[in-house]
Amino acid sequence: MLRAPPQAPRASRRPPPPRCSPAAAGPPPPPPSAGGIRRLVLTPEGRAKLDARPDRDFYAFPRLVKHVDDGFLAALTDLYRDRLRPGWDVLDLMSSWVSHLPPELTLRRVVGHGLNAQELAKNPRLDYFFVKDLNKEQQLELETSSFDAVLCTVSVQYLQSPEKVFAEIFRVLKPGGVCIVSFSNRMFYEKAIGAWREGTAYSRVQLVTQYFQCVDGFTQPEVVRKLPSDAAGGKPASPLDAVMRLFGMAGSSDPFYAVISYRNFKPM
Ligand SMILES: C[S@@+](CC[C@H](N)C(=O)[O-])C[C@H]1O[C@@H](n2cnc3c(N)ncnc32)[C@H](O)[C@@H]1O
């Protein structure tokens, strides 16, 4: 014999719990706001530097040197040739006396940022520059949606609050604007963050990819790699390189990595 199911208590005045059918779920939750930080990528140890003194002290004297070899720089300039367009407004973040831009590329405005005013003053591509320690404060005094491209060359490993810096990069980019972050395996070891120092080439690419992904509204990052074996098979980077190769003395070229992402056009 079938029994009647037990009766629910009657006196409850609470509204019934929401049902799970899509029709009853109501409107979807509001999307996270574009440019917002979704999550933190680094742990406190991952952000730590061996040399905890202020970065401005470390960069107090100008270093008018190349931080990577000619093969790397040729790959970088070629990438800029491919991705940047004449007439653009460009921000060179964490810059120095050289921006590695193709000499034939005429831009509307190039703004430079770094930690050493003497280095930046020597950079012939900059129309304007400013000095700011991004490990002290991440906000950029630059207009929202005002740049077609933001570049960051061989420097991302020094950022201790990359999530906030990448949110600022997103803010200053125009919709559709591109950010190109390039790096190799060289670094000022004591000034690089723990997550970078302890990492491998693969994990560093992953780290920069996550810096983009943690900000809502960047497109899926794209990775460009040129490893020394590719470089050896390609064009010599300089006449000296060509001569060295002739005598079988070609030094191994610095590996080239770039992670590229765009500020999405779509409303988020
Ligand atoms: C290895 S150099 C690279 C310079 C330049 N991008 C180039 O391609 O030659 C690293 C640069 O990172 C910048 N930098 C390092 N720590 C920084 C910080 N805390 N805030 C802002 N910039 C920083 C300095 O301006 C320094 O010139």
Image: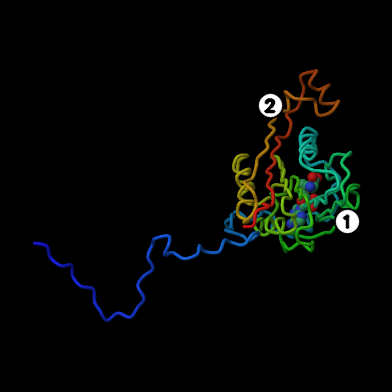
Residue 234 x/y as whole percent: 75, 25
Disc on res. 51? none
Q: Earlier in the sequence, mark 2 or mark 1?
A: 1
Circle 1 sits on which residue?
A: 128
Bin the neighbour count of mark 1 within 10 Å (Cα to Cα): few under 14, some 14-19, many 20 and up: some
Q: Nearer the viewer, mark 2 or mark 1?
A: 1
In the picture, the quarter occupied by the C terminus is bottom right
Q: Residue at x 50, y 62 (%)?
A: 28
Q: Quadrant of residue 16?
A: bottom left
Camera-side residue of 15 and 194: 15
Camera-side residue of 191 and 263: 263
Residue 89 x/y as whole percent: 83, 51
Q: Secondary structure at mark 1?
A: strand
Type of residue at label 2? Ser
Q: Residue at x 36, y 70 (%)?
A: 17
Camera-side residue of 242 and 24: 24
Q: Residue at x 70, y 35 (%)?
A: 255
Q: Secondary structure at mark 2?
A: helix
Type of residue at label 1? Tyr
Structural distance between the alpha carbons of marks 2 and 1? 38 Å
Circle 2 sits on which residue?
A: 229
Camera-side residue of 170 and 209: 170
In the picture, the quarter occupied by the N terminus is bottom left
Q: Quadrant of residue 42?
A: bottom right
Say how many tags the image has. 2
